[in-house]
Amino acid sequence: MRHKITKIRGLTVNVEIVEVSQSDKNGGILCYVAAIYIQPHGSAKKTLVRKSRLPGAAEAVRAEIRKDGLQAFHRLMA
């Protein structure tokens, strides 16, 4: 089982993407879950914004945040 945590620091909030995946011996995907959390600066509280079971979803969110910045946060929260 693999765990990957990616943190993207923003001006007012941080985004944390937690990916968990498991593969069989042939490389096929058995399980994949990505959870996206938003954490305001100065707070220990994280808010779950989105979960996905589609491989590559976390990379798409990461690219969207880097491209659109604050506007991507508004779309994630909706």
Image (tube, rainbow, N blue to C red):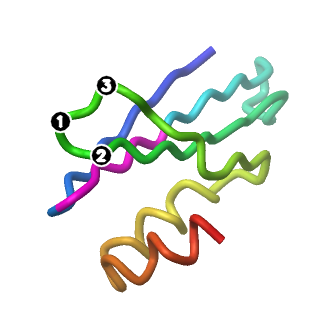
**Measured from the top left, where is residue 15 in percent x and y?**
37, 49
Could you tell me how far apart the alpha carbons at marks 2 and 1 are, in whole angstroms?
A: 6 Å
Q: Say which of 42 and 34 sits in front.
A: 42
Are circles 1 and 3 on residues that touch, CB within 8 Å? no
**Tag count:** 3
- Is residue 16 one of those drawn in magenta? yes
Residue located at (63% from left, 59% from top): 57
The quadrant the C terminus occupies is bottom right
Q: Which residue is mark 1?
A: 42
Is the residue marked by circle 3 packed among few (<14), some (14-19), or many (20+) residues within 10 Å? Answer: few
Query: At label 3, which amino acid type do we have?
Result: Ala
Horizontal side of residue 23 vs 1, given as left or right: right
Instruction: Residue 44: give its label.
Output: 3
Kind of residue at badge 1: Gly
Instruction: Please provide percent x and percent y for residue 50.
Output: 66, 51
Residue 45, percent across and down? 40, 29
Split into 4 quadrants, where in the image is the N terminus?
Answer: top right
Q: Secondary structure at mark 1?
A: loop
Range shown magenta = 12-17
Q: Quadrant of residue 71?
A: bottom left
Residue drawn 44% across the image and 34% down it: 46
Q: Dot 2, crowdedness within 10 Å: few (<14), some or many (≥20)?
A: some
- Alpha carbon separation for disc pair 2 and 3: 8 Å
Q: Are the two marked residues, 2 and 1, in contact with CB atoms closer than 8 angstroms?
A: yes
Asked if residue 52 is among those painted magenta in the image, a careful observer would answer: no
Element under label 3?
Answer: loop
Predominant SS along the magenta part:
strand
Tell me, for residue 40, which label it has, or none.
2
